[in-house]
Image (cartoon, coloured by chain):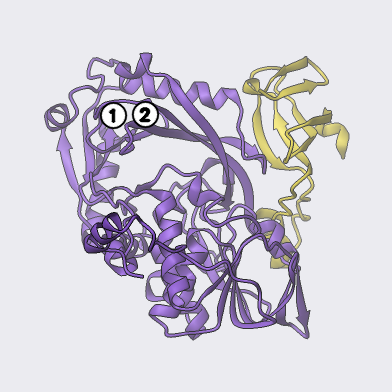
Amino acid sequence: MRYSGFRVIKEALTGHKGWGPAWRDAAPKPHYDFVIIGGGGHGLATAHYLAKVYGKANIAVVEKGWIGGGNVGRNTTIIRSNYLLDGNEPFYEHSMKLWEGLEQDLNYNAMVSQRGIMNLIHTDAQRDAFRRRGNAMILNGADAELLSAADVKREAPFLNFDNARFPIKGALVQRRGGSVRHDAVAWGYARAADSRGVDIIQNCEVTGFRIEQGKVLGVETSRGYIGAGKIGCAVAGSSGRVMAMAGMRLPIESHVLQAFVSEGLKPVLPGVITFGAGHFYVSQSDKGGLVFGGDLDGYNSYAQRGNLPVVEDVCEGGMALMPMIGRVRLLRMWGGVMDMSMDGSPIIDQTPVDGLYFNGGWCYGGFKATPASGYAFAHLLATDKPHDTAKAYRLDRFRTGRMIDERGAGPQPNLH
Amino acid sequence: MLRINCPVCGTRDETEFTYGGDATVVRPAMDETRAQLWLDYVFNRDNPRGPHTEYWHHVQGCRQWLVMERNTLTHEVGECHLAKEAC
């Protein structure tokens, strides 16, 4: 069923009796050509592009809980393509272009809102670095603008311009950045994939791989054995656990990242704003809540909840940047488990096991990458060759010395 | 707040410490030439969901490196001793 304005009117006049479920509750079949492990944004996007762009059929997505219940439902919904390095920027710009056409592609309102992202500059050195990054973005076909302090004051007059310790000296702005309704991304991809015959199998946890003579034959799950021609693993947060079942150790640690949302306010923020002196980033949801976050807690964790020192640190950053939020009440806070890779960049590649493919290591940048990640992973699964935009995301880059370390922090996952 | 039982200073807040990562990886001998061993040491991790042996540096206290048991799923803190006594 296609969604449209006409359809809404028709359903309104006929008692809303015609809306069906957006996707089928599929039961597992004994064998699929492609099995995607993980019904999050990346897994569902992979299934969608595999069916739509690469014309593949007989595809299943297996999810241990319910779709969209993992990190695609636990992020801060920001999209941007403001990276510096050659391995990253074309990939994230591809993602941005896919975001721009996503709703038409999926026939689903994902509330893609390009309200802009503003990275604030507080020192001369930071201005040099951001100018360089902006130029790298422009060279890769993205948009970037360098604002003066006066420009920033005009666009965001509520910021603290009297801060002697961290004066605001300007900003790097990407106008095409913004935010997206995160749950709708999972639901939209699920519905679009389902409409092309993809089986979405929920409450189906992978408990092992069946591997013979170096080739994967299928997955053992809580709902029985499922045979597969090719298996793609897109379970960021749990990558280490799942790939350990296939006998692999990864250059990844799982860390917890917290996010926060305040009570609903009238519109106060024009777009996404990031503090360049502390670690604090904030946007305002369409419901009015301020959605914000900061650093990782800093130690390995699978707990999906964080600790108070980071709450304090994030709130201090918020108060330093925009004192007006001091009386705002916090409504909710939560933690998500991040695949923190050793260089801060993701992995989309084949594995040493024939027929098993890996997508993970998204650190805390996985949400904005969802469309391009699915696209590149589908390309890899369909053709056995890396997509042009994801050629640098190889699993063996730590061996060959081709790390993509945007932050320059070295193999310290908690610092990326 | 994690409360870490430093064997020198007693039980202190996590904010006095910095995290040093997985303490089970062993640095190869300096004359080791097999790349795989160095790769495993520098980059690859078990990343367990459950008990984890890890380094903490009491940087705001006695400045000693500690080895602590902690559960990555529950954040339960276990035994803690000086790193120099561990090996």
**Residue at position x 52%, y 31% from top?**
A333
Q: Which mark is residue A97?
A: none
Q: Position of residue B46 (x, y in %)?
A: 74, 54
**Residue at position x 29%, y 17% from top?**
A324
Q: Residues within 10 Å of mark 2 (few under 14, many from 20)?
A: some
State yes or no: discs 2 and 1 in contact (Cβ < 8 Å).
yes
Kindly identify the amino acid type of the residue bearing the numbered disc 2.
Ala
In the foreground, B78 or B65: B78
Per the rendering, the colour in which chain B appears is yellow
Chain at tag 2: A
Please name the residue that numbered disc 2 is placed on. A277
Q: Position of residue A168 (x, y in %)?
A: 24, 26
**Residue at position x 35%, y 56% from top?**
A16
In the rendered image, the quadrant that contains the N terminus of chain A is bottom left
Q: Position of residue B54 (x, y in %)?
A: 75, 39
Please name the residue that numbered disc 1 is placed on. A122
Q: Is residue B14 left or right of residue A364?
A: right
* Residue A195 in sight in this render: yes
Per the rendering, the colour in which chain A appears is purple
* Residue A391 in sight in this render: no
Kindly identify the amino acid type of the residue bearing the numbered disc 1.
His
Q: Is residue A297 above or below residue A353?
A: above
Chain at tag 1: A
Q: Residues within 10 Å of mark 1 (few under 14, many from 20)?
A: some
Q: Position of residue A304 (x, y in %)?
A: 62, 40
Marks 2 & 1 on one chain: yes
The furthest residue to the front: A14
Instruction: Give the mark, 2 or 1, whose residue is nearer the N terminus.
Output: 1
Q: How far apart, in angstroms, are the residues tagged by discs 2 and 1?
A: 7 Å
Q: Secondary structure at mark 1?
A: loop
